[in-house]
Image (spheres, grey):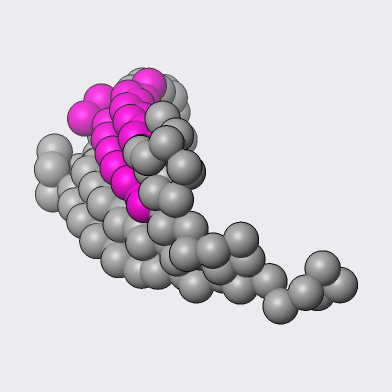
């Protein structure tokens, strides 16, 4: 979503949000990723603007194990969905927060 917050377009907003979740053919393997990124732009003049932004990102997941031997001792194949570890033993959980700004100024029409 984005648009002006004032009638003269001196204050603008943008809101970005995303979610991605996935499961695998392998038991206990799943991931979740959430991002939220709002921003505000202040137009200070015809050629100058300031953009303030924030980004929140959160990743949670259990990675897959693909480095397993393809055969049991009786030469039979392992099931495709076999997870050769303890559930949640290798889980990942990471959260980031980013704050920032961008000052933009056009010095002339040639630049």
Coordinates of residue 2 in the picture (x, y in percent): 44, 34
Which portion, as a residue range, is magenta? 15-40
Coordinates of residue 42 in the picture (x, y in percent): 42, 58
Residue 25 seen in the current view: yes
Q: Which residue is located at x 47 percent, y 43 percent?
A: 9
Residue 98 or residue 64, whichever sits in front: 98
| Most common secondary structure along the magenta stretch | strand
Residue 69 seen in the current view: no
Q: Which image quadrant for residue 84?
A: top left
Q: Which residue is located at x 30 percent, y 66 percent?
A: 99
**Is residue 36 covered in magenta?**
yes
Residue lying at the far front of the rendered structure? 8
Q: Which image quadrant for residue 109?
A: bottom right
Image quarter hosting the C terminus = bottom right
**Is residue 80 covered in magenta?**
no
Image quarter hosting the N terminus = top left
Residue lying at the far bottom of the rendered structure? 107
Q: Which residue is located at x 25 percent, y 60 percent?
A: 96
């Amino acid at each position: 979503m984005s648009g002006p917050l004032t009638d003269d377009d001196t204050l603008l907003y943008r809101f970005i949000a995303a979610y991605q979740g996935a499961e695998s053919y392998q038991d206990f393997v799943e991931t979740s990723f959430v991002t939220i990124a709002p921003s505000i732009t202040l137009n200070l003049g015809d050629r100058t603007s300031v953009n303030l932004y924030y980004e929140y990102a959160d990743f949670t997941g259990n990675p897959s194990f693909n480095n397993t031997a393809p055969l049991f001792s009786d030469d039979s194949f392992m099931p495709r969905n076999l997870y050769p570890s303890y559930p949640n033993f290798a889980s990942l959980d990471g959260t980031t927060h980013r704050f920032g700004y961008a000052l933009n100024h056009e010095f002339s029409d040639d630049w």
